[in-house]
Image (tube, rainbow, N blue to C red):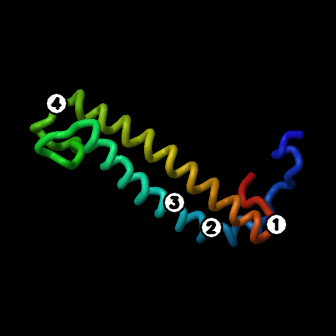
Amino acid sequence: MNRSAEKKPASTSAKILYRPIGLVSSTIGGLVASVVFKKIWQRADPGDHPDPPGALETEYPLKKILIAAVVQGAIYSVVKTIIDRAGARAFERWSGEWPGD
């Protein structure tokens, strides 16, 4: 049976109680994603510059800046989703209610 079909919509109190957890997990997700991206970029583009190119750095061609932005966005999205989902599952185990929906 579909797991989401078994769930009741979250109560207002569950949504309110989850907000601080969601904020903390989002912050942690952003920090983790940043570290992961920097490590991946250092391996993908070894050279004199250990940090990925920024949009306003003239020494990099636009193509390289766009590739870095796409890779960073994908990594951020995946890491944030994994951490947000884990936080929601932990909240559900603790409270008995899913915080979303």
Q: Residue at x 15, y 35 (%)?
A: 60
Against 80, residue 31 (above or below) is below
Observer-nearest of 31 and 50 = 50
Front position among marks 1 and 2: 1
> Which numbered disc flags the more N-terminal residue, 1 or 2?
2
Q: Secondary structure at mark 1?
A: loop
Residue 80 vs residue 39: left or right? Answer: right
> Distance of mark 3 from mark 2, alpha carbons?
10 Å
Image quadrant in which you'd find residue 11:
bottom right
> Which numbered disc flags the more N-terminal residue, 3 or 2?
2
> For the residue marked with disc 2, what is the amino acid?
Arg
Residue behind mark 4: 61
Image quadrant in which you'd find residue 19:
bottom right
Residue behind mark 3: 26
Residue 96 is labelled as 1
> Distance of mark 1 from mark 3, alpha carbons?
21 Å
> Distance of mark 4 from mark 1, alpha carbons?
51 Å
> For the residue marked with disc 4, what is the amino acid?
Pro
Residue 72 place in picture, x, y as percent: 37, 42
Residue 83 vs residue 14: left or right? Answer: left
Residue 59 place in picture, x, y as percent: 10, 37
Against 23, residue 38 (above or below) is above
Q: Secondary structure at mark 4?
A: loop
Residue 31 place in picture, x, y as percent: 41, 60
> For the residue marked with disc 3, what is the amino acid?
Ser
Front position among marks 4 and 2: 4
Residue 101 vs residue 83: left or right? Answer: right
The reply to whether discs 4 and 3 touch (Cβ–Cβ < 8 Å) is: no
Residue behind mark 2: 19
Q: Secondary structure at mark 2?
A: helix
> Which numbered disc flags the more N-terminal residue, 4 or 3?
3
Front position among marks 3 and 2: 3
